[in-house]
Image (cartoon, rainbow, N blue to C red):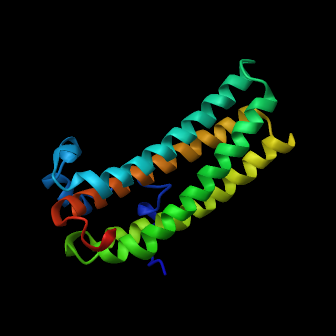
Amino acid sequence: MTKTIEEELRLANRTRLPDALRVLLEEFPRTGWDSHPNFKGLVEFWLGRHGMFREIVAALKSDAEAEMDGKIEPRARDMRLSRYGGALVNELHGHHQIEDHHYFPTLMGLDARISKGFDLLEADHDDMDGLLDRFTKAANGVLRGDMETGRFREELLSFEALLDRHLNDEEELIVPVILKHGPGGLH
């Protein structure tokens, strides 16, 4: 169960992790992650999943823009939206379940200074459920012809910004923990 998070720290309201949760990031800055001995394997795979989510959203946005510019037929856009949109929703839900039930409980006890960050990330996942529902409704609206592509693109921009905020914060909290302590019981 998600703990109460201050309103200013909710996903839609914050611009980055609070400084108190960035202490390990200072010790393990992003620029050195890929050269750290604990990067290969789990961290590399996990960041790859985050990259895939970003790529799918970028492709959906590109398709919407191409359809608006007459560079892709609506039917081709619909096929890609159905395929990639469904994959995005399903993969994000599965990814969050693994994090909430396996990764976060294992990692949260490794450094007391950042333990509250896991409550923040769980709250993000609750917020992301609402965002994914909104995305699904918008995508289905486009597929049914009830929503214009331009409006869907605007929904995608909002979704992309919040997804990216969440993924960046999650990476900046979790990757330094794994780099410092190793993947341990996370496999």
How many marks can you see? 0
The residue that appears at 58% across and 47% down in the rendered structure is: 159
Q: Position of residue 14 (x, y in %)?
A: 41, 54
Foreground: 83 or 19?
Answer: 83
Q: Position of residue 157 (x, y in %)?
A: 58, 39
Q: Is residue 83 left or right of residue 94?
A: right
From what the image shows, is residue 36 above or below residue 115?
Answer: above
Q: Quarter of the image holding residue 69?
A: top right
Q: Quarter of the image holding residue 112?
A: bottom left
In the current view of this chain or complex, which residue is farthest to the left? 27
Q: Is residue 122 visible?
A: no
The residue that appears at 73% across and 47% down in the rendered structure is: 138
Foreground: 125 or 56?
Answer: 56
Q: Is residue 40 left or right of residue 128?
A: left
Foreground: 83 or 69?
Answer: 83
Q: Is residue 95 visible?
A: yes
From what the image shows, is residue 9 above or below residue 75?
Answer: below
Q: Position of residue 143 (x, y in %)?
A: 81, 42
The residue that appears at 21% across and 54% down in the rendered structure is: 25
In the current view of this chain or complex, which residue is farthest to the bottom? 1
Screen quadrant of the C terminus: bottom left
Q: Is residue 18 left or right of residue 127?
A: left
Foreground: 48 or 100?
Answer: 48
Q: Is residue 155 left or right of residue 74?
A: left
Q: Position of residue 23 (x, y in %)?
A: 18, 60
In the current view of this chain or complex, which residue is farthest to the right? 145
